[in-house]
Image: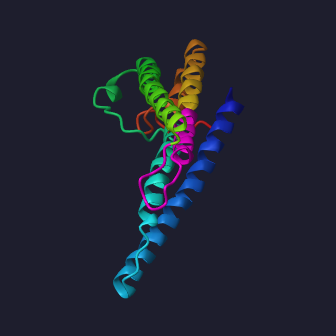
Amino acid sequence: MHSLYTGLYRVSRFSVWLFGAGYLLIALATTADVLTRNLFGISTPAIYEISEYVFAVATTWGFAYVLFNRAHVRIDVVYQRLGATVRAWLDLASLLALGAFVAVLTWRAWATLDETLLFGSRARTALQTPLWIPQSIWLAGLAFFLLCLVFLALYVLVLLLGGQVQRVGHVAGIPHVSGSAEREG
């Protein structure tokens, strides 16, 4: 399971770099657009449309990386006062709850893409972007996040059943509470 953990983490890290570069390109393009608009009166509205797609796609693909680095926001007032075993079971419960929520999001994203494909929807903009393109990449990011959540929940369950409570903290716990800010893999 550890090699699968490492593989999924590497895919998430690659996607963060890839879509992080997208953020950088959008920032540069927006800066260029602002400068050309103010200096020459020329603007490219397509920049804003593309930046919306990049933002949505990069966000969904970044979720898995944040998950593997245990950086999602959690309220830990009570959590940090509990024993390691209780914390480990709460870590599993949080993965399952987040997984249920992301499953609904992914299902609705699929329904949105399905409707887009059914009607051949395009953006109501100058670019008239076929919406299936950004929606497919957006859905893939959500699906990858869901896959990582399911895997991580199973991994944590295997660790719990094997009595490896401390490792659960390194895989799914809150970094400053688990005694280590380092990732498992």
Q: Is residue 1 above or below residue 37?
A: above
Image position of 161 (left or right of 107): right
Q: Where does residue 181 sit, x and y in percent of width and height?
A: 49, 42
Is residue 111 within the magenta segment? no
Q: Please tell me which residue is depicted at 48% across the width and 48% down the height of the picture.
A: 122
Residue 12 position by quadrant: top right
Q: How many marks?
A: 0
Q: Please tell me which residue is depicted at 39% across the width and 87% down the height of the picture.
A: 40
Image position of 66 (left or right of 43): right
Q: Quadrant of the C terminus?
A: top right
Q: Quadrant of the N terminus?
A: top right
Observer-nearest residue: 54 or 113? 113
Q: Is residue 124 above or below residue 108?
A: below
Q: Please tell me which residue is depicted at 43% across the width and 59% down the height of the picture.
A: 49
Q: Where does residue 54 sit, x and y in percent of width and height?
A: 49, 54
Is residue 142 within the magenta segment? yes
Residue located farthest toward the top when viewing the structure as drawn: 161
Q: Please tell me which residue is depicted at 57% across the width and 38% down the height of the picture.
A: 140
Q: Is residue 77 above or below residue 129?
A: above
Q: What is the magenta range? A: 121-145
- Say whether residue 182 is visible: no
Residue located farthest toward the front when viewing the structure as drawn: 119
- Say whether residue 171 is visible: yes
Observer-nearest residue: 95 or 70? 95
Q: Where does residue 26 sit, x and y in percent of width and height?
A: 48, 65
Observer-nearest residue: 61 or 113? 113
Q: Where does residue 103 sit, x and y in percent of width and height?
A: 48, 25
Residue located farthest toward the left when viewing the structure as drawn: 77
